[in-house]
């Protein structure tokens, strides 16, 4: 993970554990609703594993449950304001 002044990146090499890397990307991008200074805004992925990583990231992202923050099954809830909601 590289903190780069608001354009934080996760770099995934071809020899990475792709399951762990996908989990890291999803957690970094969507943890705290993406409202944190280390939120992943881009993933730099080796071309040799790009398609597999994209599938794994999409699969995990589709499982994110939005809803009431008091519900233990909720992964993503309210954001700070309307602008954050739209983006």
Image: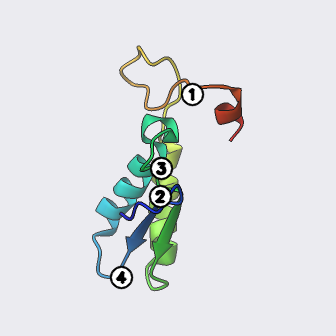
**How far, Cα to Cα, is label 4 from label 1?**
34 Å
User: Looking at the image, which residue is at 46% across and 63% down?
Assistant: 4
N-terminal of the pair, mark 2 or mark 4, is 4
Residue on which disc 1 sits: 79
Q: Please state which of the two labelled residues, at mark 2 or mark 1, is closer to the viewer.
A: 1
Q: Residues within 10 Å of mark 3 (few under 14, many from 20)?
A: many
Label at residue 14: 4
Does the CB distance between marks 3 and 1 fall below 8 Å?
Answer: no
Label at residue 29: 3
Viewer-side residue, 79 vs 25? 79
Residue on which disc 2 sits: 57
**How far, Cα to Cα, is label 2 from label 4?**
15 Å
Q: Please state which of the two labelled residues, at mark 4 or mark 3, is closer to the viewer.
A: 3
At mark 3, the secondary structure is helix
- In the rendered image, the quadrant that contains the N terminus is bottom left
N-terminal of the pair, mark 4 or mark 1, is 4
User: Looking at the image, which residue is at 45% across and 68% down?
Assistant: 53
Viewer-side residue, 63 vs 6? 6
Q: Please state which of the two labelled residues, at mark 2 or mark 3, is closer to the viewer.
A: 3
Q: Residue farthest to the bottom?
A: 48
Q: Residues within 10 Å of mark 4 (few under 14, many from 20)?
A: some
Q: Please state which of the two labelled residues, at mark 4 or mark 1, is closer to the viewer.
A: 1
Residue 42 lies, with reference to residue 78, above or below; the image says: below
Q: Residues within 10 Å of mark 1 (few under 14, many from 20)?
A: some
């Amino acid at each position: 993970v590289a903190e780069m002044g608001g354009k934080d990146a996760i770099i995934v090499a071809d020899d990475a554990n792709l399951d762990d890397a996908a989990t890291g990307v999803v957690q970094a991008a969507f943890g705290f609703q993406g409202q944190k200074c280390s939120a992943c805004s881009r993933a730099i992925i080796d071309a040799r594993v790009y398609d597999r990583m994209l599938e794994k990231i999409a699969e995990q992202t589709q499982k994110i449950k939005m809803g009431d923050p008091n519900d233990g099954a909720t992964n993503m809830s309210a954001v700070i304001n309307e602008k954050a909601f739209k983006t």
